Image (cartoon, helix red, strand yellow):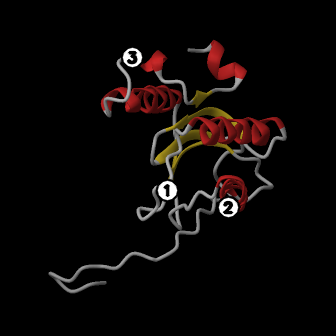
Amino acid sequence: MPESGELQEFPQRLHHAVPAWVKSGSCFHIRLRVDLASAQTLTDSLVAHGLLDAARFYHERQRWHCRLFLLMPDHIRALLAFPMESQMSRVMGEWKHYATRQWGIRWQTNYFDHRIRSAAGLAEKCACILRNPVAKALCQRENDWPWVWRSDEAITSR
C-alpha cells in the first residue's frame, strides 16, 4: 500500500482475463487505440473497409460476437462477447496482429475493456459509442458516420 502522497504505479500490461464467474456471452466494451506516435488514420477508406471486413470475419467465424464496431480516426470502439473457451486477450491480440500485417497499423500495447452488466447498460454504451463521431464533430448525425458495423441482431434492435 503506498504511503500518503505517493503515487501508485499501474502494471505495464493488463491481463484482460475474463473471470470464471462471468456468464458466457457477456458483452464487453472494447477500445483499441492507434499508437500515439503513429500517423495512421483508421478512417482512411481502404483501411476502414478492411478493418470492418475483418471485424465481420471474426464475427462470422465465431471468434467473437460483435454487436457494434465503430472506427474513429485514432481508435476503435466495439461491443464484443467472447466464447468462454477463448481468451479475450488472445483473440484481441490476433486481430490486432492481423490489422498490423495488412495495413501497417501501429497499436498501443494495451486496450481498454469493461464488462457490460445489464441490458440498460448495453443500450446506454451503444448510444454513447454511436454519438462519438458527432461529439468529435466528424459528422452531424449518428447515421451519417460510415465507419460502423453491427451484426444483424444489433441492427434490427436499433
Could you say which is closer to the camera, residue 79 or residue 83? 79
Q: Name the residue rendered at 66%, 59% in the picture.
A: 100
Seen at 47% across and 77% down, the residue is 12
The answer to whether residue 37 is above or below residue 63 is: below
Residue 93, numbered circle: 2
Q: Are marks 2 and 1 in contact (CB under 8 Å)?
A: no
Give me the C-alpha separation between circle 3 and circle 1: 25 Å
> Which comes sooner in the sequence, label 3 or label 2?
2
Mark in the foreground, 2 or 1: 1
Q: Give the distance between the C-alpha atoms of the residues marked 3 and 2, in whole angstroms.
A: 32 Å
Foreground pick, 23 / 148: 148
Q: Would you identify the image quadrant in which residue 2 lies? A: bottom left
Q: Is residue 69 above or below residue 1?
A: above
Residue type highlighted by circle 1: Val
Identify the amino acid type marked 2.
Gly
Residue with the mark numbered 3: 141
Mark 3 belongs to which amino acid?
Arg
Which residue ends up furthest to the right in the rendered image? Answer: 61
Q: Quadrant of residue 27?
A: top right
Instruction: Please name the residue that numbered disc 1 is placed on.
Output: 34
Distance, label 2 to label 1, CA atoms, is: 14 Å
Crowd band around label 1 with a 10 angstrom C-alpha radius: few (<14), some (14–19), many (20+): many
Q: Secondary structure at mark 2?
A: helix
| Residue at figure coordinates x 46%, y 17% from the top left | 144
